[in-house]
Amino acid sequence: MKVEKILLSHGGGGEETLALIKNFFLKYFDNPILGNLEDSAIILNSFSKLAFTIDGFTVKPIFFKGGNIGKIAVTGTINDLVVMGAKPLYLTVGFIIEEGFKIGDLEVILQTMKEEAIKNGVTIVAGDTKIVPKGEVDGIFITTAGIGEILYEGISCKNLVSEDLIILSGSIGEHGACILAEREGIGVEIDLESDCNSLFSLVEPLFESRLEIHAMRDPTRGGLSATLHEWAYASSVVILVEEEKIPVKPQVRAFCEAFGFEPYHLACEGRVVIALPEKEASKALALIRKHPLGREAQIIGKVIKKSSFPQVLLKTLYGTHRILENTSGELFPRIC
Amino acid sequence: MKSLNSLNLIWNNFKDPQRVKFLVKLIKKEIESLGKSLNLMEFCGGHTHVILKYGIDELLKDYVNFVHGPGCPVCVIALERVDLALELAKKPEILLCSYGDLMRVPGSKGHTLVSLRAEGYSIKAVSSSLETLKVAKEFPEKKIIFFAIGFETTAPHTAVLIKEAYKNKIDNLFVISNHILAVKVLDFLLKSEKKPFVEAIIGPGHVSTITGSKIYESIVKEHNIPIVISGFEPLDLLQAIYLIVKQKRENRCEVEVQYTRSVTKEGNPKAQALLEEVFIIRDRFPWRGFGDIPFSAYGINSKYEILDAEKRFPLDISKLEENPHCLCAKVIKGIKKPTDCKLFKKICTPQNPLGPCMVSSEGACLAYFKYKVGNLYV
């Protein structure tokens, strides 16, 4: 009998669970490590420093323009490793699925995860599935943990110093605008795709170049503003960015105007912000711009000074200065 | 989204840096020939935010001193009215609905609607008055009170709700009107002894779409002060300021409308008729910072008193003292700036607001907190 929907029995740990694993998860993720179906994956010690992270994904809607929850679950964790200077190697995946979830939808998600993993040379080596009764979770939640090998040591949000320049790899806010546009109460057609993407191939040449890099972040929840604030606080510095230099697609700008958001607060899922010494900036910018994801990269500002009053300032289009407000409070749950 | 994109072009035009620079130059030149800087009050909190967000105050530094006015409906809500909302919300049979900004304004004991909600009381933030109709249907066992706030801008929405609820005989929905009148507070402020020095007024944009520009004519005459009604984009405000400066240069004193794409002399007759039908003007109403102002707020007309929660759930709320260190009452009147307050940015922040001006999206303190770069920090 063809199974069309996830049933509670798929989580029972018996025949149906095994069938779900073999017929679906292994169908997409099979590899010699995962295929053993042991309680944990045995992986090779790479004898180098490792980066290790975990992230949960609850994005609503599950399918959005430019991706789905599976894509973001793989790229999100990969990106967390990448911005610490690591080459992602292994992922583990946990699914929490609501009873009645369509198998067809699950397969689309698995296919996307497989493609993203292959594209980035990572292997999904262990997994877990829990099925919960209807109403106890909204469709599907995914958690991924990842291990990566450090290629470039010493990147940290505490490293910013005076005169560092800030590079942004592309236009901001597309993921956030895409997700919000489909939200209840907003619901507008938006001619825009999420920027959801893995960043490894974009920044790998930077790691190889051995240019001096101080800090690197993917501005996800809280957007560019939250990333810059984290840096300012962690490094006790004042950062100044220029509105004119920050790329924002017209669709995102229009969306923000119409609904009272600022693009600086909207999440990106495929952009990176880098802080590095002025002397390295033009070389780094050239390397980033060579990659399709980095064509619109810009130097958007600089660290103006060390300060016990860390701040992020924005130079407006009129040459005036204002505080770039940190993201706080009410901003929308479940964008990733 | 195509339409949003074409709107984007229009919006861009209202922000165009070249035009902004040009107008700033022009204004400065006019003010120079006037021979002295100008003290302008922008009535609306919405204007305050645009001025600070885009640094218009910085662009016109030494030429224009902006005095921030009382046009922030959440900021001017009297403490006793906030306490009223909190007390009503504590009654087990009641589900209290209001607009989001009010939810975080602290009452006299430091509670907010949000903190009460976390304790389990039934409280809901709505973004439109008509949402409460749905709430009433969804919770038939509860008595729903819509705690309505706002100037003439939002009053027609409440009027529509009251008419709908009355027509459809919805028996578990009630309204408390805290709707206040912009022109009354402006007149009261200009008449009061302790008032800021103001030479012209940037008039409210959204209120005026409802009331029309004609309601300001008596104020202009009586107080001999020009009023120019402005839109909410940087170029709107600069153009309004230019019109004011021109009036000063030509020794005129008039009501002018810069925001002509929304505001007419007569206003919105449909909305006015609704207000007339549903509301009566209260003899007096308490305002934060001002005390009681005569004839300054809407109450619910006796025809609809069956829906009037103030009559249905009478509560005796005693007047309590404001936090003596909180300067909101003076900030609202334009006598003090947010940065004059000892609590500002230290104890009082958007995450932990002590006064309404730090809560409301139109509050002056929030605008300073969000945008203003203090000398200390640069």
Image (tube, rainbow, N blue to C red):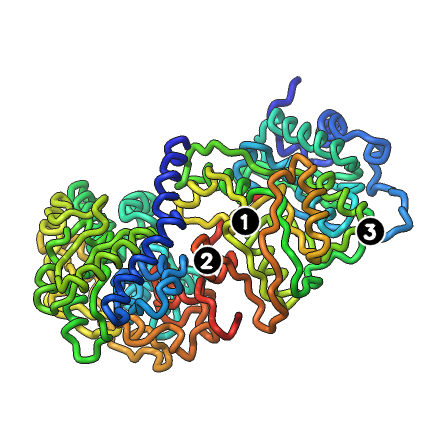
Q: Amino acid at mark 1?
A: Lys
Q: Chain of mark 2?
A: A
Q: Quadrant of residue A320?
A: bottom left
As drawn, the label of residue A245 is 1
Residue at the (58%, 60%) spot, across then down: A229
Camera-side residue: B253 or B18? B18
Q: Position of residue A311 (x, y in %)?
A: 55, 65
Can you see residue B178? no
Camera-side residue: B6 or B297? B6
Camera-side residue: B174 or B190? B190
The residue that label 3 is drawn on is: A50
Can you see residue B343? yes
How much space separates mark 1 and mark 2, taking CA atoms?
Answer: 12 Å
Q: Position of residue B226 (x, y in %)?
A: 16, 63
Dot 1 falls on a residue whose secondary structure is: helix
Dot 3 falls on a residue whose secondary structure is: strand
Residue at the (57%, 31%) spot, across then down: A100
Q: Position of residue B305 (x, y in %)?
A: 13, 55
Q: Chain of mark 1?
A: A
Crowd tier of the residue under label 3, counting other residues whose Cα lies within 10 Å: few below 14, some 14–19, many 20 or above: some
Crowd tier of the residue under label 2, counting other residues whose Cα lies within 10 Å: few below 14, some 14–19, many 20 or above: some
Q: Position of residue A57 (x, y in %)?
A: 62, 43
Q: Amino acid at mark 3?
A: Leu
The residue that label 2 is drawn on is: A319
B286 horizontally vs A145: left or right: left
How much space separates mark 3 and mark 1, taking CA atoms?
Answer: 35 Å
Residue at the far top: name it: A1
Q: Nearer the viewer, mark 3 or mark 1?
A: 1
Q: Are marks 2 and 3 in contact (CB under 8 Å)?
A: no
